[in-house]
Image (cartoon, rainbow, N blue to C red):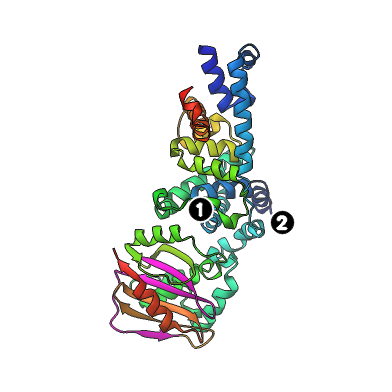
Amino acid sequence: MKDCEQFQIAYASSPDNMDVDLASHSEICRECAIYADAIRELDLKLVDSMKFNVPDDLLSVLKAIPEHSGSGKSRWMVFGGFALAASLLLGLGLSSVFRLDLITQSVPLQQVVYQHILGEPKALTAIFPVQPAVMNARLKEFGVSLVQPIGEVMYVKLCPVGNTQGLHLVVQGQKGPVTFLFLPKENIAESVSFGKGRFVGYIKPSELGVVAVVGEKGEALNETDALVQSSLKWL
Amino acid sequence: MDTKKAEYDRLVVVYASDLYRYAIWLCKDSTQAEDLVQETFLRAWKSLSKLKNRDAPKPWLFTILRNEFARQYSRYRPEMSDIDPDILELKDTGNDTSTDAFVLRRALDILAEEYREPLLLQVLGGFSCEEIGAICGISKGAAMTRLFRAKKKLREMLDPTLVEK
């Protein structure tokens, strides 16, 4: 029995590095021979079940990392959303604010918000909607729940924004992605609008704290905003 | 091309796919998995000079990824009880969507973390028990025991009649 136990532990954990004497145990023990067959079959199934496709551009993105890591430019520049983020930057006329060292308490909140959106271009380029269960789990973690549908949610994540934790939510609008950033611990006296180019938006006080809304020019931001905000309730 | 960049590129080519698949299992989200792998390689690039065993960089990379996940991403991970089983299909990853594969992945996901992690490292990383022990911070013997139990539990989940045997 001891041999059987030793054999099975060794076979399950390191079949290719078994002691020769122990490995030969299955030749005289039918139960262990059957066990070895079952483990071999399980291992093959495990390998097959984990053959996830790797994104086509993963290697090129990873290879480009060194070109940007030491230059003071953050890694977002190598992401696929660079062009979109750059457009947003230009649209907002904020090229001077894109400096990591500007995230301080003295920086206006809207600049911190821009900074965050620009730093996460993947949020603007998601192809697949977020699974409802994932979305609900993240909303719950943030402390809110969804009381009615808000359309296709393309991105949802809890993010450190400035000195606080915010909810970064992107929904599919009529003209493109519409970004919401909820910052419950921040305060702002009045709404501030921004953007003259392709992207426009505003930041304003709301029941969920400060909320920033950014979308393509011509997007019905107010309508989307009203829908999203009326659909999110504190738990 | 300088030596450091050439070495880095080789790490990307050889190990990126395995790291991504491991990240998928940690994050359950392809976007987060990509981010995690990018962060891993960014850190690898910055600390390439600290790589002690240049002939065996894989455990080093997996350890970076595992630590980065623990540091940054694990707090965002939804509780499994909140997740619809359909998410295990991981539809946007192009994986095997056969029923057999689905059932196995589901069983893997139910498996306790202490058993799942060594198993993932063995299957996805091809690590030895000694390496798994080093990555997980446990002894080689403990890694062997966990792998044995992981497969025992998996088999029992897939075939409940084995529980009675």
| Residue A35 higher or lower than A76, as above or below | above
| Crowd tier of the residue under label 1, counting other residues whose Cα lies within 10 Å: few below 14, some 14–19, many 20 or above | few
Name the residue beneath numbered marker 1: B86
The answer, for residue B125, to whether it is visible in the render is: no
The magenta span reads A165-194
Is residue A188 on the magenta stretch?
yes
| Crowd tier of the residue under label 2, counting other residues whose Cα lies within 10 Å: few below 14, some 14–19, many 20 or above | few
| Residue A158 higher or lower than A188, as above or below | above
Asked which quadrant contains residue A212, the reply is: bottom left
Residue A12 image point, x, y percent: 56, 26
Nearer to me, B4 or B103: B103
Residue B137 image point, x, y percent: 45, 35
The Cα atoms of the two marked residues, 2 and 1, are separated by 45 Å
**Circle 2 marks a residue in which chain?**
B
- Left or right relative to B60: residue A112: left
> Circle 2 — which element?
loop
> Circle 1 — which element?
helix
Q: Main secondary structure of the magenta part?
A: strand
| Residue A139 higher or lower than B26, as above or below | below
Label number found at residue B1:
2
**Circle 1 marks a residue in which chain?**
B
Residue A1 image point, x, y percent: 51, 12
Residue B37 image point, x, y percent: 56, 53
- On the same chain, marks 2 and 1? The answer is yes
